[in-house]
């Protein structure tokens, strides 16, 4: 008995000394801020909770399935000392909710009511059928004891049949309306009590281990990256010219089209868009040694398939600010809300003013990020070998601290929409060029002047051909314009084909426009009413026993990668 008592005392002491199991507390959160990247989003959820003293497992449910677990970060502050321990995520399948206890009774009552209405309809239809059969009989057969009905009673019989048919029809109409209403009530109740499909999309939940020295309020911020969201840049470019040909001005408006299908509700969030791309990888690819060897035909085998954060706002900013009082100015022009630019060394963030709603159905929400008026260098540009039209070409410098990402541009000239174009990537300080439609006051013509071919007289001789073209540019404006003509002379990458530029060619301003070999340009100022002639002449030579063809090459940087091939 003494040994048993000692054992009991020891067990009680151990239990008293052991720490209490952590309490589980389900948290209610709201999405406070979202930073959207071109290929994803960073979401911050704010949680305010009353924590008991000691250890607590804080459970955050209904997180999106597309959440990247490696990106989950937790920050917090409390009334007293607060320690954040481990954080884990897990997939929680959708749970089928239990139906309301009284729903089955209401559903049964509605079905009984429907059966009663259906029975009444069947009785009314039978009664109307009997009246119709009675009305179809001849008057001489309507009397009792098979005796003919007196002629003076025919009118009363017809009236009685008509009244009965009208009353039966009205009763049937009312009964069928009641039947339809009963069907609608049954369908609505069945839909509201139907349990969720267990095969539906599951969600994620996070468990955060916390330890508070004393009970009190705590504020937790949970941040994670999620797929199913992004934004694309769009632009408005508005060129304002002057009738006297003075310096034109260009306004470039930057916009963002934001969309999301994350399964979350982005209502009243602090929204920002970032130029950082989170899916492009973290480092440059490794360059390995390349060996030249004799070509061996590949064996037929199946190759194994290859396996194919942004820092959140601090907790203080998670509080909802009080809305500013609107300033009422009578008949003043509307002001455009613009985002605030926060440019860093490697990315730029545009923070939208106020709080924004972004629907989760994939539809786009447009935001105005900013506008800037730029100095525009206007040139009349033409490529007469392809199109004998002069176009307004505007060059400018990206003066923003943020890069201009590739996107669609709506082109406006002097208040008129003239078309759409595309803007390529331009870093801060980079050069940008956009077209602003045709200039019909500058006339361009290009015509062949000479084409001469020799006829070889024996096998193996050289065939040659001389070509010469003349381009005429006429300025019909009342002011001088700066013009640029783009033309080309073919190139050869084969030593057996020789191409020579002839002295008759007008000396070009540039010989490799945009690093395109053989593409020439002539840039000049053209006075009002003046014309400019440009001549392009060249000679081509190749073996007479071979055929040649013209091939249009892409830009040097746009060439497709060569496919593996044997070296002979």
Image (tube, rainbow, N blue to C red):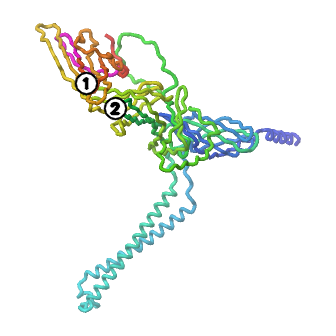
Q: Which residues are magenta?
A: 536-555
Residue 47 occupies quadrant: top right
Extreme residue toward the right, this view: 2
Residue 534 occupies quadrant: top left
User: In front here: 415 or 436?
Assistant: 415
Residue 64 vertical position relative to residue 250 in the rendered view, above or below: below
Q: Is residue 540 magenta?
A: yes
Q: How many marks?
A: 2
* Residue 530, numbered label: 1
User: Magenta: predominant secondary structure element?
Assistant: loop
x, y percentage for residue 481?
31, 26
**Residue at the disc numbered 2:** 244
> Residue at image x 24%, y 86%?
139
User: In front here: 327 or 77?
Assistant: 327
Q: Is residue 192 left or right of residue 28?
A: left
Residue 501 vertical position relative to residue 552 in the rendered view, above or below: above
Sequence-wise, which precedes: disc 1 or disc 2? Answer: 2
Residue 497 occupies quadrant: top left
Q: Is residue 337 left or right of residue 180?
A: right
x, y percentage for residue 45?
59, 41
Residue 567 vertical position relative to residue 162 in the rendered view, above or below: above
What whole-number distance in Å separates the C-alpha atoms at marks 1 and 2? Answer: 17 Å
> Residue at image x 55%, y 44%?
355
Q: Is residue 291 magenta?
A: no
Q: Quadrant of the N terminus?
A: top right
> Residue at image x 35%, y 76%?
169
Q: Mark yes or no: residue 497 visible.
A: no
Q: Secondary structure at mark 2?
A: loop
Q: Are marks 1 and 2 in contact (CB under 8 Å)?
A: no
């Amino acid at each position: 008995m003494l040994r048993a008592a000692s054992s009991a005392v020891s067990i009680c002491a151990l239990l008293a000394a052991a720490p209490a199991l952590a309490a589980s507390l389900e948290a209610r959160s709201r999405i406070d801020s979202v930073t959207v990247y071109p290929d994803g989003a960073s979401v911050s959820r704010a949680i305010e909770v009353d924590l008991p003293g000691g250890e607590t497992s804080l459970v955050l449910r209904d997180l999106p399935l597309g959440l990247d677990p490696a990106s989950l970060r937790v920050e917090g502050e409390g009334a007293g000392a607060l320690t954040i321990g481990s954080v884990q995520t897990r997939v929680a399948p959708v749970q089928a909710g239990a139906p309301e206890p009284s729903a089955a009774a209401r559903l049964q009552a509605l079905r009984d009511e429907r059966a009663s209405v259906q029975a009444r309809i069947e009785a009314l239809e039978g009664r109307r059928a009997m009246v119709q059969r009675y009305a179809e009989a001849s008057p001489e057969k309507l009397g009792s004891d098979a005796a003919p009905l007196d002629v003076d009673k025919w009118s009363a019989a017809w009236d009685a049949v008509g009244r009965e048919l009208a009353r039966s029809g009205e009763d049937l109409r009312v009964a069928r309306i009641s039947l339809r209403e009963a069907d609608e009530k049954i369908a609505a109740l069945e839909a509201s009590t139907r349990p969720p499909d267990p095969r539906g999309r599951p969600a994620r939940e996070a468990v955060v281990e916390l330890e508070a020295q004393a009970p009190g309020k705590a504020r937790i911020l949970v941040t994670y990256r999620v797929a199913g969201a992004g934004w694309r840049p769009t632009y408005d470019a508005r060129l304002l010219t002057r009738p006297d040909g003075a310096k034109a001005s260009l306004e470039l408006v930057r916009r963002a089209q934001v969309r999301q299908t994350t399964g979350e509700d982005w209502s009243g969030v602090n929204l920002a868009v970032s130029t950082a791309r989170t899916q492009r990888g973290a480092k440059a690819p490794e360059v390995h040694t390349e060996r030249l060897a004799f070509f061996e035909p590949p064996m037929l085998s199946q190759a194994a398939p290859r396996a194919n954060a942004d820092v959140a706002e601090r907790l203080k900013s998670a509080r909802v600010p009080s809305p500013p009082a609107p300033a009422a100015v009578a008949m003043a022009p509307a002001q455009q809300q613009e985002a605030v630019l926060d440019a860093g060394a490697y990315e730029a963030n545009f923070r939208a003013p106020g709080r924004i709603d972004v629907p989760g159905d994939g539809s786009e929400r447009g935001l105005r990020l900013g506008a800037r008026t730029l100095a525009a260098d206007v040139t009349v540009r033409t490529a007469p070998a392809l199109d004998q039209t002069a176009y307004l070409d505007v060059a400018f410098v990206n003066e923003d601290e943020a890069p201009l990402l590739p996107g669609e541009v709506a082109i406006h000239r002097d208040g008129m929409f003239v078309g759409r174009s595309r803007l390529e990537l331009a870093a801060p300080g980079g050069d940008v060029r956009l077209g602003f439609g045709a200039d019909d006051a500058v006339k361009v013509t290009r015509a062949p002047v000479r084409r001469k071919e020799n006829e070889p007289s024996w096998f193996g001789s050289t065939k040659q051909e001389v070509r010469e073209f003349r381009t005429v540019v006429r300025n019909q404006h009342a002011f001088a314009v700066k013009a640029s003509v783009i033309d080309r002379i073919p190139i050869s990458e084969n030593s057996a084909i020789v191409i020579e530029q002839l002295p008759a060619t007008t000396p070009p301003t540039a010989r490799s426009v945009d690093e395109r070999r053989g593409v020439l340009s002539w840039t000049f100022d053209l006075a009002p009413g003046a014309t400019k002639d440009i001549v392009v002449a060249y000679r081509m030579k190749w073996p007479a026993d071979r055929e040649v063809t013209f091939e249009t090459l892409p830009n040097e940087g746009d060439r497709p990668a060569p496919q593996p091939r044997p070296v002979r």
